[in-house]
Amino acid sequence: MDVSGEMIRVTISLGAVFSLPGEETEAVVKRADGLLYQAKETGRNRVVMDNRCFLYTSLNVDTRHCVS
C-alpha cells in the first residue's frame, strides 16, 4: 500500500463464522472473536473459519439456515 509516497505492508487476520438457527448475535460475535484470536496466534494473513455449515453440506443437510 502506498501512503504519502512510502510503501507500507498491511496484514489481516480474520475469524469467520456462520450464524446458526436461533443463535443470538452476541454468541455469533463471541465465536468469531475467538477464531480471530486463533488466527492471530498462528501468524499473519490468516483466516480461521467455523466450518459447521461446510460439514452440514458434506452430509447433505439443508444449509439454507447457514447465513454468513
Image (cartoon, helix red, strand yellow):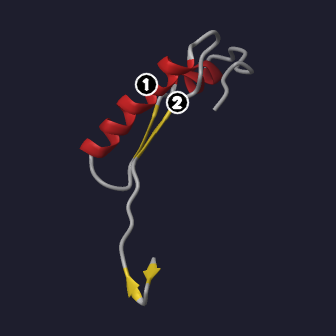
Which residue does the numbered mark 2 point to in the structure image? 17
- Kindly report the distance in space between the C-alpha atoms of the residues bearing marks 1 and 2: 7 Å
Name the residue type under label 2. Answer: Val
Rendering quarter of residue 48:
top left
Q: Residue furthest bottom?
A: 5
- Residue placed at 56% from the left, 20% from the top? 25
Q: Are marks 1 and 2 in contact (CB under 8 Å)?
A: yes
In the drawing, does residue 66 fall left or right of residue 10?
Answer: right
Q: Secondary structure under badge 2?
A: loop
Residue density around tag 2, few if under 14, some if 14–19, many if 20 or more, within 10 Å: many
Which residue does the numbered mark 1 point to in the structure image? 31
Vertical comparison of 8 with 13: above or below: below
- Residue placed at 67% from the left, 27% from the top? 67
Rendering quarter of residue 19:
top right
Rendering quarter of residue 20:
top right
Vertical comparison of 30 with 38: above or below: above
Q: Residue furthest front?
A: 4
Vertical comparison of 30 with 10: above or below: above
Q: Residue 29, image x and y in percent?
A: 48, 27
Residue density around tag 1, few if under 14, some if 14–19, many if 20 or more, within 10 Å: some
Q: Nearer the viewer, residue 58 or 16?
A: 16
